[in-house]
Image (tube, grey):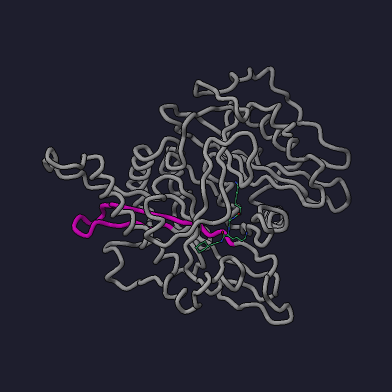
Amino acid sequence: KHLFWDSQPVPKPDVPIKKDGPLHQDTPFEKIPKEPVEIPEGYEWCLVDIHNDKEMTELYTLLSKNYVEDSDELFRFHYTPEFLKWGLNPPGQNSNWHIGVREKSKKRELIGFISGIEVEMRVKDIKKRMAEINFLCINKKIRKQRFAPILIKEITRRINLSGIFQAVYTAGIQIPTPFAICQYFHRPLNPKKLVDSGFSHLPPGMTMSRLINKYKIISDTSAQLPGLRPLEERDIPQVRKLINKYLNSRSKMHQVFSSDELTKHWLMPKNNVVYSYVVEDVLKLGKITDFFSFYLLPSTVLKLRNSDPSKPSPKNSKTSSSPLNYLINSAYLFYYGTNPEPAANTDLSNSEMTHKQMNEIKLKDRLLILMYNCLMMAKRENFDVLNCVNTLDNGMILDQLRFGAGDGKLHYYFYNYVANGLKPSDVGLTML
Ligand code: EN5
């Protein structure tokens, strides 16, 4: 059934592998092919230059017409050119890993793409340089021609030539073999627009005004954390420490924020791309106690159910107006961290509760406040919904903050690596 994946260094479903670690040893440089993988007649390899606006527009167009959709083909991810430039350009990235396929015709249309960036990962007790693979996309008109395996083999070859033999990637679909299967959750901020677009439904017996009330975000100063403000460059060293410490103690696989430069790239606020906030201690000015971030990833509404196509489409702030060209502005929870006050050395010997349990409760209380503030900031920036998966500590806050399960799943994979027994809450890596 999975002819390609059967030939690849990934675990076989139903064949447990006892030991964690690589599936095969590193290939010596001499044994790695120096020529590109062969490509079908009529097509050629190219690089997509992310600093060239014309080529970025081509990539943006390919993805906005052909990339990931939900299972009912109602919505499609709409990554913007600014977003793609950010996502593909972290410090130290390799331009050789932005691989395109073009038709050999006069138009030389871009019909395929795959990308990798280098990340330092920690998986349990092992630190390893890996490639993070994303944005694999083939034009719909040549699906079924088996281009994906060719793109995967070619990027693997180029990554191997750089001395890297492991990769991490995510997908909505299940292939052999995920190490974690996570669930998407959604927190409506603009419930009326979500219902109008078919993103969510008015539950039976519910009125629109009651729905709006259910998802109202109180954003007066009494609800807002004192000291909450956008992340600034001077905060980067502290935020880097905070995020590494948080991920280290709360997850078993995550990216290491190995330099200030890298941290700055991923977290400094960029309008319409990434939004980051810190909580500055009001008593010790300059000291950062918490932070959170989210990114903008709109989805195109592909079809409108239960609506008269002759009627004008819903009009909304951040959207364009033609009927089948309007967007849901989704915020995706990105990185966050908090520096919990160590629990006071209370004598718990007569209590049912352990220190560990007490610390978990304190952490949950803090995260609820922090994530409510996250919802406030996303609402203020006019987002329609805040999305996340149940990785890391997200599971602690979903119910109370009125997130609901979506119909999508996110599967996490390693290439040429095994890590047994990871639960969604052990996963600390968030991909774009
Ligand atoms: C790239 N490295 O399925 C990998 N999205 O739930 C990318 N559903 O938006 C992998 N079907 O549930 C991406 N609304 C994998 C995800 C692909 C996209 C996808 C799902 C995630 C999604 C929405 C729309 C469903 C439309 C019909 C959904 C319900 C929201 C509702 C709000 C109120 C509380 C209950 C839930």
Asked if residue 106 is among those painted magenta in the image, a careful observer would answer no
**Image quarter of the N terminus:** top right
Magenta: main secondary structure equals strand
Please tell me which residue is depicted at 21% across the width and 44% down the height of the picture: 342
Asked if residue 287 is among those painted magenta in the image, a careful observer would answer yes
In the rendered view, would you say 202 is above or below 404? below
| Residue at far bottom of view | 311
Magenta residue span = 276-298
Where is residue 186? Give x, y as percent: 50, 59
The answer to whether residue 162 of the structure is visible from this angle is no
Please tell me which residue is depicted at 69% across the width and 54% down the height of the picture: 63
Q: Nearer the viewer, residue 427 or 13?
A: 13
Where is residue 380? Give x, y as percent: 43, 70
Please tell me which residue is depicted at 55% across the width and 75% down the height of the picture: 317
In the rendered view, would you say 163 is above or below 134? above
Q: In the shown orientation, is residue 79 left or right of residue 353?
A: right
Q: In the shown orientation, is residue 334 left or right of residue 321?
A: left
The answer to whether residue 109 of the structure is visible from this angle is yes
Q: In the shown orientation, is residue 152 left or right of residue 358?
A: right
| Residue at far front of view | 205
Where is residue 39? Give x, y as percent: 82, 36
In the rendered view, would you say 123 is above or below 30? below
Of the four image quadrants, the one with ligand 1 is bottom right
Q: Total marks drawn?
A: 0
Q: Residue 114 sits in which quadrant?
A: top right
Please tell me which residue is depicted at 60% across the width and 34% down the height of the picture: 177
Q: Nearer the viewer, residue 39 or 314?
A: 314
Q: Nearer the viewer, residue 35 or 137?
A: 137
Where is residue 239? Give x, y as percent: 35, 48
